[in-house]
């Protein structure tokens, strides 16, 4: 095999948040296998490439991982540069381990190109550091989502142990997440934010407290969203509520 498969991070959505290496590989790629959430402006950088959608979205038809693995291995027999384009960073909730293991087992050269993960894009969007000297020294990135047959997912313990938590793929399960956290002793007054479409022009954030999480989730749309949880959000929550009060008074 003369080609290489590149697992490339597409970042949170904004095209100018791609790394220079990612942009160069897209421009040189012969074929690109891309996730469902990769925006059209990023795909447009792969002007010469055949583009194959292999995305996974909750509640919708998804491409089987075994099929993706085989397509990547087959493609490298015909093309010198094969890009597997993943939202965010390939190495965080991107099933990169499965693709890396399969490709290496089949003698395929593979390289990883990191991207900006959604949690960091969300923190940048709302201007809130996930850590804070003297107040928040730990941050956890978790997802309650697990596939059938997987071992139990102990996301709850990680959230309880961290000063700040970012919950991926959780907005649709906001009621169950809130119930689990409250039942485990997390205070109902813990500040939360749901950040939707971070880094994109249509980005939107709703602030509240853990006890209000299901109602907050009901205000979001269909874009990719993250739940941010922790006292680092206290100032942003207060500012958002003051702005809402001013708007209400203005009428």
Image: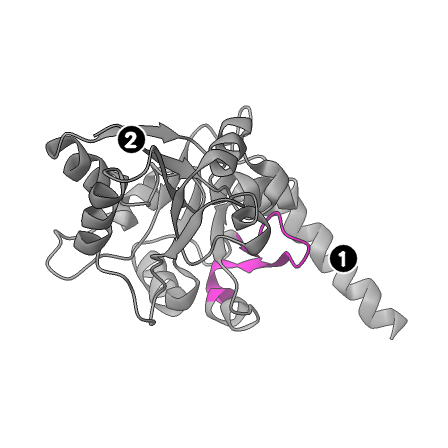
Q: Residue at x 56, y 55 (%)?
A: 40
10, 239: nearer the viewer: 10
Image coordinates for residue 229, horizontal then vertical, percent: 48, 49
Q: Which quadrant of the view contains residue 111?
A: top left
The residue pinned by badge 1 equals 242
Image coordinates for residue 216, horizontal then vertical, percent: 54, 67
Image coordinates for residue 138, horizontal then vertical, percent: 42, 31
* Residue that extends furthest to the front in the rendered view of this protein: 78
Q: Is residue 133 left or right of residue 156?
A: right
Q: Residues within 10 Å of mark 2 (few under 14, many from 20)?
A: some
Q: Residue at x 33, y 72 (%)?
A: 59
Q: Is residue 75 left or right of residue 237?
A: left
1 or 2: tag closer to the N-terminus: 2
Image coordinates for residue 61, horizontal then vertical, percent: 30, 70
Q: Which quadrant of the view contains residue 235?
A: top right
Q: Is residue 182 left or right of residue 118?
A: left
Q: Residue at x 36, y 58 (%)?
A: 55
User: How far is disc 1 from disc 2 in space, using C-alphas?
Assistant: 56 Å
**Is 199 covered by the magenta stretch?**
yes
198, 236: nearer the viewer: 198
Nearest to the eye among marks 1 and 2: give it. Answer: 2
Q: Residues within 10 Å of mark 1 (few under 14, many from 20)?
A: few
Labelled disc at residue 233: none
Quadrant the C terminus occupies:
bottom right
Labelled disc at residue 3: 2
Question: Is residue 217 depicted above or below 122 in this figure?
Answer: below
Q: Which range is magenta?
A: 192-213
């Amino acid at each position: 095999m003369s080609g290489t498969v590149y697992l490339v991070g597409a970042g949170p959505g904004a095209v100018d948040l791609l790394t220079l290496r990612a942009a160069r590989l897209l421009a040189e790629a012969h074929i690109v296998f891309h996730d469902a959430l990769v925006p059209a402006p990023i795909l447009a950088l792969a002007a010469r490439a055949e583009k194959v959608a292999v995305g996974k979205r909750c509640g919708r038809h998804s491409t089987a991982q075994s099929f993706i693995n085989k397509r990547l291995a087959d493609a490298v027999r015909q093309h010198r540069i094969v890009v597997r384009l993943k939202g965010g960073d390939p190495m965080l909730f991107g099933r990169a381990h499965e693709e890396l293991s399969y490709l290496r087992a089949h003698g395929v050269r593979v390289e990883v190109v990191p991207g900006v993960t959604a949690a960091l894009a969300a923190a940048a969007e709302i201007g809130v550091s996930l850590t804070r000297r003297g107040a928040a020294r730990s941050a956890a990135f978790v997802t309650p989502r697990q596939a059938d047959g997987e071992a139990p997912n102990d996301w709850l313990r990680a959230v309880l142990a961290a000063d700040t938590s970012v919950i991926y793929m959780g907005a649709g399960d906001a009621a169950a997440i809130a119930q689990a956290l409250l039942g485990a002793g997390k205070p109902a007054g813990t500040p939360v934010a749901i950040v939707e479409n971070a880094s994109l022009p249509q980005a939107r954030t709703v602030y509240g407290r853990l006890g209000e999480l299901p109602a907050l989730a009901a205000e979001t749309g269909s874009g990719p969203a993250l739940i941010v949880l922790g006292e680092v959000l206290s100032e942003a929550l207060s500012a958002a509520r003051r702005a809402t009060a001013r708007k209400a008074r203005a009428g």
